[in-house]
Image: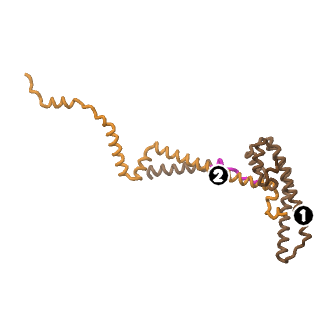
């Protein structure tokens, strides 16, 4: 092996090595748990430790209720699919039962919107105006905040 | 007895007087060096030229250092790209965490 090949291989090896080492040291961690999401929020919004502790407390307090609501929404969705299946197979619709279903779903949706709104507004109360603006930008895709002017 | 004058003496005297160099001497020397290097490079071809460059230790060291810097730059670009993707994914996960309606199809939102 002549000198040129040796230098070329050495350059390639050094380039690949530094690339891998730097990437492994700086690659973003991957966690989808509530702690991981809140840690991301802390770095994204530059929250202080006190702000983070309060926001974590708020999220942990509302988490069981939001999970229960999500389960109810999923159940309503399954019920709706069953209604639709019955209508398609037998071409019959129990309008009274369907009206009750729609009413129940409206109630659940209202509770979902209210719970989300309360959590977001309580979290925003802990933040500075700049953090709040950034936070509202993040949550603007959530159903209760589709129109940002409603939160001001 | 005086000796006969040597006919070589005037010639030697003339030779000892060094003439002033031409003002174009330096440029001519460099032109000839460049020409010689060009001819040499053309005779060696691409690989010959490459080997000539890599045979110089400073160039070899600079090449390896450049490879290391390129590797670092590409790693930084890759890390930034992954961080952007991760932020987007975490924002989506967070929205699903706080909004139960986002976990479901649009069916659930119909009145």
Furthest-top residue in this view:
B1
> Would residue B104 be found to the left or right of residue A23 on screen?
right
Residue assigned mark 2? B81
Numbered mark located on residue A103 in the image: 1
Residue positioned 73% across, 46% down in the render:
A44
> Residue B50's x, y, as percent?
43, 50
Q: Secondary structure at mark 1?
A: helix
> Would residue B39 be found to the left or right of residue A142 on screen?
left
Q: What are the residue bounds of the magenta stretch?
A: A23-32
Q: Secondary structure at mark 2?
A: helix
Prevailing secondary structure class for the magenta stretch in the rendered image: loop
Picture layout, residue B7 above or below residue A46: above
User: Which marked residue is nearer to the observer: mark 2 or mark 1?
Assistant: 1
Picture layout, residue A63 above or below residue B12: below
Q: Is residue B25 magenta?
A: no
Residue positioned 76% across, 48% down in the render:
A41
């Amino acid at each position: 092996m002549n000198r040129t090949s040796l230098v070329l291989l050495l350059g390639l090896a050094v380039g690949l090595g530094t690339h891998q080492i730097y990437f492994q040291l700086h690659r973003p961690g991957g966690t989808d748990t509530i702690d991981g999401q809140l840690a991301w929020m802390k770095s994204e919004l530059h929250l202080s430790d006190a702000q983070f502790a309060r926001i974590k407390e708020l999220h942990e307090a509302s988490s069981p209720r939001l999970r229960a609501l999500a389960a109810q929404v999923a159940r309503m969705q399954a019920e709706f699919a069953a209604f639709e299946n019955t209508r398609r197979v037998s071409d019959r619709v129990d309008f009274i039962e369907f009206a009750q279903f729609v009413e129940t779903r409206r109630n659940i949706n209202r509770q979902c919107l209210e719970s989300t709104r309360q959590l977001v507004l309580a979290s925003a109360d802990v933040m500075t105006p700049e953090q709040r603006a950034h936070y509202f930008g993040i949550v603007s895709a959530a159903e209760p905040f589709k129109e940002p002017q409603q939160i001001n | 007895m005086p000796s006969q004058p040597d006919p070589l003496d005037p010639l030697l005297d003339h030779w000892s007087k060094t003439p002033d160099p031409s003002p174009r001497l330096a440029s001519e020397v460099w032109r000839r060096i460049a020409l010689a290097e060009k001819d040499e490079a053309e005779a060696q071809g691409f690989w010959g030229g490459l080997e000539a460059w890599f045979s110089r230790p400073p160039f070899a060291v600079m090449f390896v250092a450049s490879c290391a810097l390129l590797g670092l730059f590409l790693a930084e670009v890759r890390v930034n790209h992954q961080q952007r993707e991760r932020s987007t994914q975490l924002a989506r996960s967070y929205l699903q965490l706080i909004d139960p309606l986002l976990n479901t199809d649009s069916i659930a939102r119909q009145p």
